[in-house]
Image: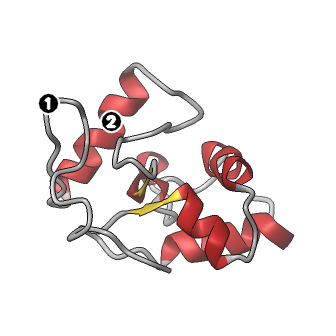
Amino acid sequence: MKKQTGFSAKVYSLVKSIPKGKVTTYKEIANALGTSAYQAVGQILAKNPEGFLSGGKIPCHRVVSSDGKIGGFCGSKCGEPICQKKKLLEKEGIRFGKDNNIIDFEKKFFRP
């Protein structure tokens, strides 16, 4: 596997620090890196070469939208990948409301 460098490596490093049972946002990752490039963070995570679904160590499923909604996963904004992201989060103790918002978002929030 190709070694990540620069901004991507910093994003992945921060995402690795998110504890099981917690979530953060694309915006928080960007802010922690001193930028407002929230969409760039999302694009990097959409190309995660070491995601949990493939047996990797970068838990990008723990990054959600600022409104507490699931957001994208595996480069997809809807469909089966989002269901997989939700299942991974539920397995870690994250609960969702009817509108797919995270219940107790602030209690489950992690600030890198």
Q: Specify the amino acid type for callout 2.
A: Gln
In the image, residue 35 lies at what x, y percent?
Answer: 76, 68
Instruction: Name the side, left or right, on which 31 lies relative to 93.
Output: right
Please tell me which of labels 1 and 2 falls first in the chain: 2
| Residue 4 seen anywhere in this rendered image of the structure | no
Residue at which label 2 appears: 84
Q: Which residue lies furthest to the top in this view?
A: 79
> How many marks can you see?
2
Q: Which residue lies furthest to the right in this view?
A: 6
The residue that appears at 23% across and 41% down in the rendered structure is: 87
Secondary structure category for the residue under label 2? helix
Secondary structure category for the residue under label 1? loop
In the image, residue 66 lies at what x, y percent?
Answer: 45, 52
- Quadrant housing the N terminus: bottom right
| Dot label at residue 78 | none
The residue that appears at 52% across and 64% down in the rendered structure is: 58
The residue that appears at 25% across and 59% down in the rendered structure is: 105
In the image, residue 81 lies at what x, y percent?
Answer: 42, 30
| Crowding at mark 2 (Cα within 10 Å: few <14, some 14-19, many 20+) | some
Residue at which label 1 appears: 98
